[in-house]
Amino acid sequence: MRARTATAKRQRLTAAAARIVHEQGVERTTIADIARAADVPVGNVYYYFKTKDDLVAAALSEHAHGLETLTARLDLLPDPRQRLKGLVEAWVGERDLAARCGCPTGTLAAELGKRGEGGLGEETGKVIRLLLDWAERQFRELGLPAPDDHALTLVGAYQGMSLLANALREPDVMVREGRRLSAWLDSLPDKGS
Amino acid sequence: MRARTATAKRQRLTAAAARIVHEQGVERTTIADIARAADVPVGNVYYYFKTKDDLVAAALSEHAHGLETLTARLDLLPDPRQRLKGLVEAWVGERDLAARCGCPTGTLAAELGKRGEGGLGEETGKVIRLLLDWAERQFRELGLPAPDDHALTLVGAYQGMSLLANALREPDVMVREGRRLSAWLDSLPDKGS
Amino acid sequence: MRARTATAKRQRLTAAAARIVHEQGVERTTIADIARAADVPVGNVYYYFKTKDDLVAAALSEHAHGLETLTARLDLLPDPRQRLKGLVEAWVGERDLAARCGCPTGTLAAELGKRGEGGLGEETGKVIRLLLDWAERQFRELGLPAPDDHALTLVGAYQGMSLLANALREPDVMVREGRRLSAWLDSLPDKGS
Amino acid sequence: MRARTATAKRQRLTAAAARIVHEQGVERTTIADIARAADVPVGNVYYYFKTKDDLVAAALSEHAHGLETLTARLDLLPDPRQRLKGLVEAWVGERDLAARCGCPTGTLAAELGKRGEGGLGEETGKVIRLLLDWAERQFRELGLPAPDDHALTLVGAYQGMSLLANALREPDVMVREGRRLSAWLDSLPDKGS
DNA sequence: GATGAATGAGCGTTCATTCAT
DNA sequence: TATGAATGAACGCTCATTCAT
């Protein structure tokens, strides 16, 4: 029970960190912000996370976990094209959040990418590569040449449209680009062809 | 001469702010960082800029100015398609910087977009819209339908590839996506056709 | 015990603030001055007081508290005239402090009254009104007409003599004016008469 | 002409300092505030006043000068009692200013009195003594015993009522106390009696 | 004399992190 | 394990004063 409580607290902190860091950015988020949102005393945070960066890393993992959950669900679909289109749909479905805060991983990457080598920046890169790899697998399954390039294009488009939607405060950007991506996926030649 | 000196210092500060904010991000850049880079005593910065945000705004304007210089140069080309391809080439030419620091305006947008409404975030949006508008004009001149959508796609691709190049620390991302964008521009139907 | 420690520290800070602000004035007193006097690390002050103004407000409350303690003690006397004379005696008893630093509330009022409306200036006014109201009650109990005018005269005389004693660095001013006030109180007609 | 210009500038600075220091207090007034109000470039101030304290001293002298002008005018009246009543009238005439900013000399005394010995605090004391001395002369001329005590009472009452009017933001305080002082002066026995 | 610019010490405040219990 | 309190380094900003022309 105690262990469960402890785990629950850790989870609450992680979830709060993920949300608040997405909303406010890493630098403008204080440990106190997160502790308050998680309803955990400030001094207690350090029993679960040695440093602020550890908490940010946990937030990043939380986003990675969300991504894995999403792709796992999509993996249930029989057709890789449908999986990719499902991904695009999921992105569009988050359009309001994207317009307010951008892509969680993308904005994290933008902020953490400015730090020197060997830190959270690289971790963020790994999460993004997770998505790239999944997309590449789908394109490969579709029998397309250069599936890695296709993945780059798709994920790049997502990051770009999220950033623009955020910068312009227009969720509609997600809709317009989502429509185009969906059509593009439809236009790609089939495996058998 | 005196005025020129003053202007020169202001310009040095602006340039330093643009560079360092691009490298380190807004929040991790201190006024002292910028002052040092511009070889200006800390207290003197405030003679030229009332607040740190003013200095960040100047850095943003500097990037906007760079953008205008680039598009003005491209405007000298007779063919809108060549102009757009020239833009892509310019982006690819900056691949190393992009892999290290991302797109100056894009990363600024990601960071400042997390602040509340009515501040630097909106200014950054305006700069990005500048680029969108220029691209839209080119696509319109090409006689394409929905030139605004094409602009969104192009600029979105740029933001996406810059973010990915930065997150993955791979300048090559810029090359690969740049090649694709160039081919895409070539594939677009001509006005006359 | 922990709470008591915390309260003790808060109290130490409040007392130090009251004393030092009285000695040096609000603007010439730094947070560090107060922290040092209270033997509290500078950064810790902000755990107890959100801003410097909060600390000044606490100092003001401390002075108000001292005033209430004094009037409560005087209230034990059976005769309102004796109470008023006791107040004058108390003032004269503080003559050395008054000659060095003026009246705590009065000098605070002079300094804070120069700030715009709606802040500490008004709070200080309230404390002074506390004294006026108490004096007015005594004069009313004495059966005098216009007890509010009498209160104004008495408290005004106190503020005036404190200011002069301070400006001239002469504690004796308090003695001379105190003697006069005492005689004046004696000369006032009795209720029954 | 140049000298006259210089003198004019010095005079403008002094007048501006007197006004603004009265309004804002010494510590909250910057050299730039005064320079702006006097329409003098900031860097130029130091040709007329070596330090900020020198400027404050000049402001104090300006107030002393105003006081001398007033008493000189009152000295034209044949009767010392009329002179003293004229003084009270003058005080009441400034009731709105007093309610907003207190007595110029008195608030200056309160603020500067907190500084260590041997500075502006003592200068301010001298100005107040000027008024005390003048009042004492009138009381002596009236043939009263202890004219210095009477002076102390009168000037003390003025400082007190100014402070209270300021703290309570009630010009009416000046009217009520002024009425009382005037009646008191009338009630004093005549020389011949 | 005159002036815009320069200078740096110091202030209020924040916050990641650690401590004492 | 849990927690309020403690700590101090650092930041943005102000301003009296000085400098260069």
Image: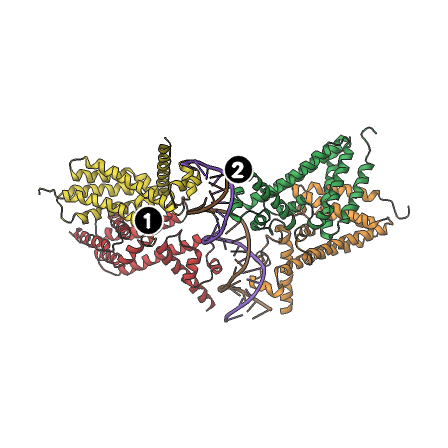
Chain colours: A yellow, B red, C green, D orange, E brown, F purple
For the point 28% across and 55% down, the residue is B99
Residue behind mark 1: A120
User: Residue B14, how many percent across, how many down?
Assistant: 40, 59
Asked which secondary structure carries label 2, the reply is: helix
Residue A91 in sight in this render? no
User: Residue A94, how many percent across, how many down?
Assistant: 29, 38
Q: Amino acid at mark 1?
A: Leu
> What is the tally of numbered marks visible in this picture?
2
Q: Are marks 2 and 1 in contact (CB under 8 Å)?
A: no
User: In the rendered image, which quarter is residue F1 located in?
Assistant: top left
User: Residue C115, how many percent across, how many down?
Assistant: 59, 47
Q: Would you say E20 lies left or right of B19 here? A: right
Q: Chain of mark 2?
A: C
Q: Chain of mark 1?
A: A
Residue behind mark 2: C2
Instruction: Kindly identify which numbered label has been placed on residue D146.
Output: none
In the image, farthest residue toward the left: A193
Q: Is residue C4 above or below residue B11?
A: above
In the image, farthest residue toward the right: D193
Residue A3 in sight in this render? yes
Within 10 Å of disc 2 (Cα), the crowding (few <14, some 14-19, many 20+) is few
Q: Amino acid at mark 2?
A: Arg
Report whether mark 2 lies on the same chain as mark 1: no
Within 10 Å of disc 1 (Cα), the crowding (few <14, some 14-19, many 20+) is many
**Marks 2, 1: nearer the viewer:** 2
